Image (tube, rainbow, N blue to C red):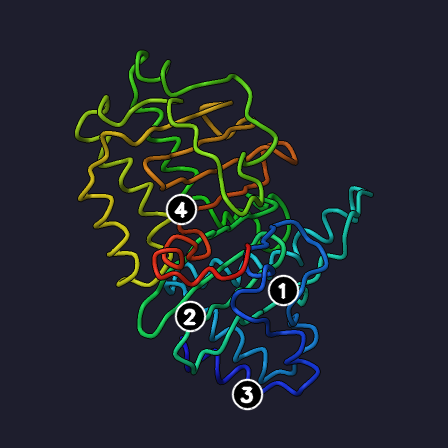
């Protein structure tokens, strides 16, 4: 990861580098958002072919092969969404796969913590690194609009279908009593509740406690959690999953709102301790997914940095 970041930075000229780099403790590092908007960082649009390849290589170091494929499909998905919006007469933003931005915080070759971000519409990947240790990998956001492509050459494509189908299957396995605890509302909220907050609130008492699931259902829940955590490289994912197994699932909760299938808006949340996953498919006639994994105390490595007395700036 350090080598990939350094190779990309070394390929930039001084003007590009000034856009692409920030001090690690700069407040910019804890800003993130998933809609299309003007961002800090260097967009693919302003890179040559070699620089783009190096940027995408850096992104790949933080993802499994499958999740890297999804990330690249999300970038390419702008070319699916653009014509659909033009056809409907509702164009809100230029849908451009070149408007994805790369940013490095700090020095990847130094002895201090450093990090990087790759972000654009429906993609927000953050890493904080110190030496040979990954300090943080969250917030980790993937989205897709349309969630299912219903016309054109990519007909039937569902980039994030697995994290939707697994959750619907889990809900279908619940009995009436379990479902009554899990479902908190007939209608889904308009978006993930954490939005782009730098620190997400925890709703501890909502939903169905995993202690009330049977063994098979707990395995299904763990599989769904792994769908998110397993998006990062195996050594990192294995460490995060081991922490979940060590503490056990009993105090984790499953929250659902909206339809129990893909027919209309639906939302779910899994939370336990500092771990939170949120998913919604609400907009565009329930054909527009937002999904995120958060580590409440350690998003952007804030907990680790506090432990090492490095927060000498107010974030």
**Frontmost residue, 40 versus 76:** 40
For disc 2, the marked residue is 113
Mark before the other along the chain sequence, 2 or 3: 3
Q: Residues within 10 Å of mark 2 (few under 14, many from 20)?
A: many
**Separation of residues labelled 4 and 3 (CA atoms):** 33 Å
Residue 79 position, x and y percent, is 67, 58
For disc 3, the marked residue is 10
Q: Quadrant of residue 189?
A: top right
For disc 1, the marked residue is 100
Residue 37 position, x and y percent, is 71, 55
Q: Residue at x 53, y 65 (%)?
A: 25
**Separation of residues labelled 4 and 2 (CA atoms):** 17 Å
Quadrant placement of the C terminus: bottom right
Circles 1, 2 touching at the beta carbon (< 8 Å): no
Q: Secondary structure at mark 3?
A: helix
For disc 4, the marked residue is 297
């Amino acid at each position: 990861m350090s080598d990939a970041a350094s190779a990309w930075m070394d390929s930039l000229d001084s003007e590009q580098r000034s856009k692409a780099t920030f001090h690690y403790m700069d407040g910019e590092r804890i800003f993130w958002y998933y809609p299309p908007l003007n961002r800090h960082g260097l967009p693919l649009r302003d890179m040559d072919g070699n620089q783009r390849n190096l940027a995408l290589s850096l992104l790949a170091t933080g993802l499994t092969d499958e999740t890297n494929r999804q990330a690249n499909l999300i970038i390419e998905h702008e070319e699916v969404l653009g014509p659909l919006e033009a056809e409907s007469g509702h164009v809100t933003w230029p849908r451009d796969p070149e408007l994805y931005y790369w940013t490095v915080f700090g020095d990847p070759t130094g002895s201090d913590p450093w990090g990087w971000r790759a972000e654009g519409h429906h993609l927000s990947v953050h890493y904080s690194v110190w030496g040979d240790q990954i300090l943080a990998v969250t917030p980790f956001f993937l989205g897709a609009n349309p969630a299912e492509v219903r016309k054109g050459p990519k007909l039937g494509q569902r980039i994030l279908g697995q994290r939707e189908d697994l959750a619907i299957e889990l809900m279908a396995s619940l009995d009436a009593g379990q479902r009554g605890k899990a479902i908190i509302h007939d209608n889904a909220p308009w978006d993930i509740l954490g939005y782009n907050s730098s620190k997400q609130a925890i709703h501890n008492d909502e939903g169905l406690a995993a202690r009330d699931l049977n063994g098979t259902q707990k395995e299904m829940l763990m599989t769904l959690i792994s769908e998110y955590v397993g998006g990062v490289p195996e050594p990192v994912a294995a460490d995060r999953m081991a922490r979940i197994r060590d503490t056990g699932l009993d105090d984790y909760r499953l929250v659902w709102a909206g339809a129990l299938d893909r027919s209309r808006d639906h939302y779910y949340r899994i939370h336990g301790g500092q771990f939170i996953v949120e998913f919604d498919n609400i907009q565009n006639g329930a054909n527009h997914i937002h999904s995120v994994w958060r580590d409440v105390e350690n998003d952007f490595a804030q907990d680790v940095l506090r432990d090492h007395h490095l927060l000498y700036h107010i974030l």
